[in-house]
Image (cartoon, rainbow, N blue to C red):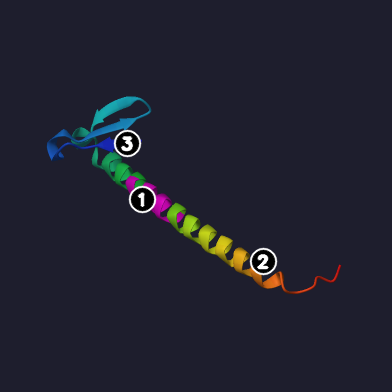
Amino acid sequence: MSNSTSNERDAVLTFEDKKYDLKKLPKEVQELVKGMQVADAQLRMHEDTLKVLAVGRQHLAMQLKAKLETINPIN
């Protein structure tokens, strides 16, 4: 789903290779589109959060590895 808007009066919804005039769609459909936009934004935000957490975890693993190099393992 993409919503390309050059300006308010030319709002076009592209969904499954079909284009729709967003302003002429029923209010209920417009609300669904807004909901999809919010969901997309939330997904992007959480994907970014996961990337930050992965980098942090990787850094912690590097620190752990460095600290364990001076300690003899039990096996």
For disc 2, the marked residue is 65
Q: Residue at x 42, y 50 (%)?
A: 43
Instruction: Tell us which disc is closer to us: 2 or 1.
Output: 2
- Between residue 33 and residue 26, name the one nearer to us: 33
Q: Crowdedness of circle 3 by 10 Å Cα count: few (<14), some, many (20+)?
A: some
Task: Tell whether label 3 touches label 1 (CB within 8 Å).
Answer: no
Image-quadrant location for residue 64: bottom right
Upstream in sequence: badge 2 or badge 3: 3
Give the farthest residue toward the front: 70
For disc 3, the marked residue is 2
Question: Whole-percent x and y of residue 59?
Answer: 56, 64
Q: Where are the magenta residues, as a range?
A: 37-46
The alpha-carbon separation of the residues under discs 1 and 3 comes to 12 Å
Q: Residue at x 28, y 42 (%)?
A: 28
Q: Crowdedness of circle 2 by 10 Å Cα count: few (<14), some, many (20+)?
A: few
Task: Please tell me whether residue 75 is drawn above or below residue 20 in the rendered image.
Answer: below
Question: Which structural element holds mark 1?
Answer: helix
Q: Which mark is residue 51?
A: none
Question: Whole-percent x and y of residue 3?
Answer: 28, 37
Left or right of 7 in this view: 42: right
- Between residue 75 and residue 16, name the one nearer to us: 75
Question: Whole-percent x and y of residue 57?
Answer: 57, 63
Instruction: Tell us which disc is closer to us: 2 or 3.
Output: 2
Image-quadrant location for residue 6: top left
Residue type, label 1: Ala
The magenta stretch spans residue 40 = yes
The alpha-carbon separation of the residues under discs 2 and 1 comes to 36 Å
